[in-house]
Image (cartoon, coloured by chain):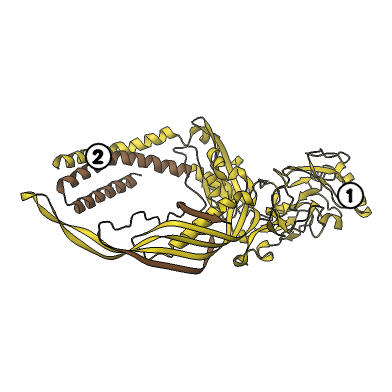
Amino acid sequence: MTTPPDGGAGPARRSWTPEEPDPDDSASADAAGESGASTPPEAAGEPAPPAEPGPAETEPVEHSAPDSTDEGHTVLDMSTGKGVGLDKCPKCGATEVEHLVGGADLRCSFCRHTWTPEAIDARFGLSEGIESLRGFVVSTGSSTITDTESLVTLSCSGCGAEVVIDTDDNLASRCHWCRSTLSIEAQIPNGAVPDGILPFTVPKEDAVKRIADFVHARRMFADSTFKKEFTTDNVLPVYLPYLVVDGNIHAQVLGEGEITDRTYLVPVRRGHGKDARTTYERRYDFTRYAVVRDFDLHVDDLMIESSEDFAGAVAASSSTTNIVNSLLPYDVKNMVAFDTGYMRGCTSEKRDLDVKEVAGAAGDMFLSIARAKADGMTAQYDRGVRWDAEKLLVKGSRWVSVLLPVWLYSYRHVEGGRPMVHYVAVNGRNGQTMGSVPVNKGKIVGAAFAVGVPVTAITMPLGLAAMASA
Amino acid sequence: MMGAVLVAVSALASADATVLASSGDGSGGAVIFGLLLFAAGPAAGVGTYIAIYNRYRNAGERYRYTTTTDAQVQNPRVRDDVTTRRRGARNARMNGDNRGRVRDRLRNSGVEF
């Protein structure tokens, strides 16, 4: 969706105003605009020519600077340092940037210069200082969504045209006049731009093969319409939004445990008269303890969905979102600063859940981790432990937003009058594959009878004979 | 698949044998053994249905965050106070043992941020 250079954005659209263009930029922009309009580089099969590099495009655009607090949260400034507008090759200034799948490198299609965006875990110390976290520490890209408008109008600093991007689906678009690529890489307050991204390392051919193998291994009892309609043409690269949280936690779990002191056999007399006989039964002596496990817990990189479409019970009732969930965890230590160069040819989901909306789920997950740790501290209780109470204080948490790569095949199927979206998905980093294939329940029932009837034919007479002999 | 069924049947049979041995009552044990054999066929059919359905739908697959997340325990404080000693219990496991069921929330459960 675009608007002409002299067209104004609609009232509902959010407009991002870049800095005043300097005369040199205007001149080069005009030239770029003319050449782009008359002979679009893509039509000629060539990458777009480099726009004149200038300071205006690389400066952050005007947007409200992060406050020291965001709804009472401490803001961790992870601004990309980039702005909104032309996303250029650092060497020649061209806007044709592509991701070299297999690593994190980006390459300029014009001058072939290759570079790697900065890894952000080390730069921002995201694996350090968990023990000193207090309250909510929320990164720039995880801050509260205050602007729900998806359409963002960019003013092309190459030629002055205004280009509208629908951030629900894209974070980059081509200027229709000068063919430059415009992108949004500053964390704007509508949740569209994350702090970091994990680029795809699994190539499409590999992902397609994994999905095809997964489905073909499950053809026998699959729904017949699904088998006819399945095609790997529908496998798409998607970036899904997650919040990665660290927690500085204090946990206390209380209960009772039992330790066996002694086991022995005791004689038990059964029956009467001439049928009386003695058998032996095992008995146990044990000691019961009141058990308390109280500890600090430092959790690093717990991942939580931050798109409503892929999180929560509502989503799960109409789609098999657990499949995508099962691909976690990802190697988020390797995430790099967000760059729209990774997004070419991919779709992405926008973050629409805030920290406060997923904090409850995070607390529940922290609690489960704490319980698992407490379990590991009770090995001596050979008869078991019955936990009765659990308390968790999250002294501090740190939240960072990230886009994670998924190769996704989806299929809509109606089951019992209820639509259900089935996913087969591949982790875009390590190739782990999981899926849900719609089934033909009649065939499965047939298979169950095919097994159950012969087993019944063998065991039922034996059972009757055993009961008759009693 | 038949192999799995046979394993299940043999497991049932061994369970029956255990019941027999521990009960010490010949007629009662034989009745239970017979009932279990009687039910083995339908159980095999139901088990087959569940196994195939799970293989296709994977409805139970989830992020295994309790085992895959890096979490370090610091400053552990441990209390184990004797409350009771008991003799002659019949069960090898304690009642209500919930170790390992870490995602089940307890009645007295609280999280504070």
> What is the secondary structure assignment of the residue under circle 1?
helix
Measuring 77% from the left and 45% from the top, which residue is drawn there? A173
Residue linked to disc 2:
B38
Image quarter for residue B88? bottom left
Measuring 86% from the left and 49% from the top, which residue is drawn there? A158
Is the N terminus of chain B in the top left, top right, bottom left or bottom right quadrant? top left
Q: Position of residue A417 (x, y in %)?
A: 51, 29
Outermost residue to the top = A417
Mark 2: amino acid: Phe
Along the viewing direction, whichever of A210 and A357 lies nearer the viewer: A357
Q: Position of residue A135 (x, y in %)?
A: 63, 60
Q: Which chain is yellow?
A: A
Asked if residue A231 shows in the view, the reply is no
The answer to whether residue B12 is left or right of residue A182 is: left
Measuring 17% from the left and 52% from the top, which residue is drawn there? B24
Please give the chain letter of the residue carrying mark 1: A
Q: In this rendering, which labeled residue sits more in front, label 1 or label 2?
A: 2
Q: Residues within 10 Å of mark 2 (few under 14, many from 20)?
A: many
Residue linked to disc 1:
A29
Along the viewing direction, whichever of B19 and B74 lies nearer the viewer: B74
Q: Mark 1 and mark 2 in contact? Answer it, CB < 8 Å.
A: no
Image colour for chain B is brown
Along the viewing direction, whichever of A382 and A204 lies nearer the viewer: A382
Question: Does residue A289 lie above or below A95 as drawn?
Answer: below
